[in-house]
């Protein structure tokens, strides 16, 4: 097929593809047909997605040719494919490629069949797989349902496997491109001229005609694109907050020590139940080092664990305890982390040195963690030369020796 297409494009070859096919078959020998099961789907019901290896493209940063990744989405009914190139992959890139494919198709299928790659499936299980939350939410935004295949059973998505092989063997084989845009433009024009106008070997119909029949049955696209976010897991700290980008956000009461799921973007931070995905709290983004806690979540009395921290600080040193009490009285539950920082300073520099520094801070009127940390970091190191030792003689001994030698007239 690739040879015939090149002959038509470059040399105005006027014979049919079957002529080239018969000629090549004589050179290498014809192979007998092999049987494969055909999965029949209704229009707009299913799409299959997968990665393959793309062409060599010069990387804009290194200036060297680098192998790209070929993303392919193939509709199950019409075999219409969307092929996109990328240098790397991640959870977000994988989701964005789906969104771009839906936009090119003008709609979304009801089911997306995929492999168990990490970008889409965190834990493979044919009955209850653990999906990547970002990928799951992107498909839900477009109304599609993911359907991971059984592990090591690629035949379930044979249509997209065939679409990958078709592109690798026909327009991209042996070619190199200077930019990713140039490679994508070449692939798009091949898709429009050759892939969409071909007569499919299984359906015996033109792909473009079948897609024109299938397109109205696709799910309509939402008015707005998906708002992407980052996600992770956090443990609720003693101040009942979780940390995101050095800022702290309050969780519901009674969550201290529990693992929660966290999602964040440029404007919001969402705290969700780790097991059910239920939204627990949603906060606006806060500056680094600041807290954001809803008024209903602020405790009316000091938790017992905070009293335990104050008792530890008092045992470490009298002035350490006084500073921690002032921090708690001034900052409330927001000062719990600073109290933990005071205990960390006592462990790093020693309780005696830290207690003396706290006494100085109280006298100067700056009993806060930041001042004490800088004070201890910049204090002069202790003297290491020994001033008193049994081997060091008193100076009077040297004086008497000098006087004795002088009286005897000893020149030494």
Image (cartoon, rainbow, N blue to C red):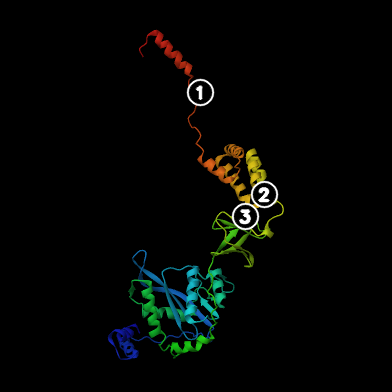
Q: Is residue 158 visible?
A: no
| 406 lies left or right of 155 | left
As drawn, the residue found furthest toward the front would be 365
Q: Find residue 127 and report its horizontal and vertical position in percent.
A: 59, 74
For residue 377, above or below residue 126: above
As drawn, the residue found furthest toward the left would be 11
For residue 52, above or below residue 202: above
Q: Which mark is residue 237?
A: 3
For residue 218, above or below residue 131: below
Q: Image quarter for residue 268?
A: bottom right
Nearer to us of marks 3 and 1 is 3
Residue at 72% over, 52% down: 301
Dot 1: few (<14), some (14–19), or many (≥20) neighbours within 10 Å? few
Residues marked 3 and 1 touching at CB (< 8 Å): no
Residue at mark 3 to residue at mark 1: CA–CA distance: 53 Å
Q: Quadrant of the C terminus?
A: top left
**Which of marks 1 and 3 precedes in the sequence?**
3
Q: Which mark is residue 168?
A: none
The answer to which of 182 and 309 lies nearer the viewer is 182
Q: Find residue 31 and report its horizontal and vertical position in percent.
A: 37, 85
For residue 278, above or below residue 286: below
**Which of marks 2 and 1 precedes in the sequence?**
2
| 306 lies left or right of 58 | right
Nearer to us of marks 1 and 2 is 2
Q: Tell me the residue that label 1 is attached to.
A: 390
Q: Tell me the residue that label 2 is attached to.
A: 306
Residue at 48% over, 67% down: 90
Q: In the structure shown, which secondary structural element does the residue marked by tag 3 occupy?
A: loop
Residues marked 2 and 3 touching at CB (< 8 Å): no
């Amino acid at each position: 097929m690739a040879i015939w297409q090149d002959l038509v494009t470059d040399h105005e070859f006027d014979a049919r593809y079957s002529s080239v096919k018969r000629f090549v078959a004589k050179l290498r020998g014809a192979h007998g047909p092999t049987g494969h099961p055909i999965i029949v789907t209704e229009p707009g019901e299913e799409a299959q997605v997968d990665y393959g290896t793309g062409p060599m493209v010069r990387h804009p940063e290194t200036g060297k040719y680098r192998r790209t990744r070929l993303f392919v989405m193939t509709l199950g009914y019409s075999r219409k494919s969307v092929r996109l190139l990328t240098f790397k992959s991640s959870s977000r890139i994988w989701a964005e490629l789906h969104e771009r494919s839906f936009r090119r198709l003008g709609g979304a299928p009801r089911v997306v069949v995929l492999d168990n790659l990490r970008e889409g499936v965190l834990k493979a299980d044919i009955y209850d797989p653990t999906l990547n939350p970002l990928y799951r939410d992107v498909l839900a935004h477009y109304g599609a349902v993911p359907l991971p295949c059984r592990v090591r059973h690629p035949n379930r998505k044979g249509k997209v496997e065939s679409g990958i092989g078709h592109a690798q063997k026909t327009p991209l084989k042996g070619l190199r491109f200077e930019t990713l845009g140039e490679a994508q433009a070449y692939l798009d024009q091949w898709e429009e001229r050759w892939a969409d106008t071909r007569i499919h070997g299984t359906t015996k119909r033109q792909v473009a005609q079948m897609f024109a029949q299938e397109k109205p049955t696709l799910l309509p696209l939402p008015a707005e694109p998906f708002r992407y976010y980052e996600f992770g897991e956090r443990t609720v700290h003693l101040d009942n907050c979780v940390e995101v980008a050095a800022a702290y956000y309050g969780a519901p009461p009674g969550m201290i020590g529990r693992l929660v799921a966290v999602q964040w973007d440029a404007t919001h931070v969402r705290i969700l139940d780790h097991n059910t995905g239920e939204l627990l709290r949603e906060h606006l983004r806060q500056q680094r080092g600041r807290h954001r806690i809803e008024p209903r979540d602020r405790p009316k009395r000091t938790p017992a664990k905070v009293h335990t921290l104050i008792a530890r600080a008092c045992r470490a040193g009298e002035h350490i305890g006084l500073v921690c009490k002032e921090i708690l009285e001034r900052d409330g539950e927001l000062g719990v982390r600073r109290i933990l920082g005071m205990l960390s300073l006592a462990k790093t520099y020693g309780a005696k040195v830290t207690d003396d520094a706290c006494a100085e801070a109280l006298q100067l009127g700056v009993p806060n963690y930041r001042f004490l940390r800088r004070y201890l970091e910049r204090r002069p190191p202790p003297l290491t030369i020994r001033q008193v030792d049994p081997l060091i003689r008193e100076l009077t001994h040297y004086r008497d020796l000098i006087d004795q030698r002088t009286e005897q007239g000893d020149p030494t």
